[in-house]
Image: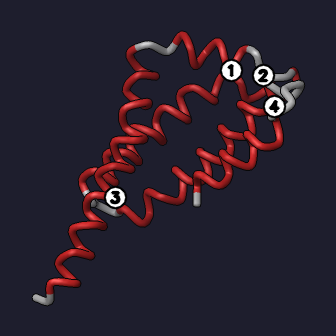
Amino acid sequence: MDSTVKLTNTGIAILRITCGLFFLIPGVINIVQPHDFLVLVERLPDIFNPVKAFIHPTVTAIEVVGGLLLLLGWNARLATIPLALMTIGVGILVNAVDIKSPLHTLSLYAHIAAVG
């Protein structure tokens, strides 16, 4: 095996494991200590009232399952789609709460750019 291919495979594995932990750890924290996330959900504007009950379990499930799939390397490409959509959605929701902040637009762009 060529050393370049070996380094590429190693780099992809490190990136996959890091991203898996990036999503898995907050998902587990949402299960163990849901209070902070639920407070954020309650601060959402009234337009989100119909979906407030589903936000916490949906985000937590996507983080835990997607993080595990990335960590284990099983269907990693398929796992990235809901993780990316969830990251964009949560970024928009977080910024919807903090709409009066002068850094609102910059923060929203940062969340979207994090998805890559």
Disc 1 residue type (three-letter): Val
Tell which circle, 3 or 2, labels the residue nearer the N-terminal end: 3
Disc 3: which residue: 15
Mark 2 neighbour class, 10 Å CA radius: few under 14, some 14 to 19, many 20 or more: some
Q: Which mark is residue 96?
A: 4
Q: Nearer the viewer, mark 1 or mark 3?
A: 3
Q: Earlier in the sequence, mark 1 or mark 3?
A: 3
Q: Position of residue 71 (x, y in %)?
A: 28, 50
Cα distance between the residues tagged 2 and 4? 7 Å
In x, y percent, where is residue 13? 25, 62
Question: On the image, numbered disc 1 is attached to which residue?
Answer: 41
Query: Is there CB contact under 8 Å for labels 4 and 1?
Result: no
Residue contact between numbered discs 1 and 2, judged by CB atoms under 8 Å: yes
Q: Quadrant of residue 108?
A: top right
Identify which residue is drawn at 81% across, 35% down: 104
Quadrant assignment, res 32: top left
Front residue of this view, candidates 67 and 22: 22
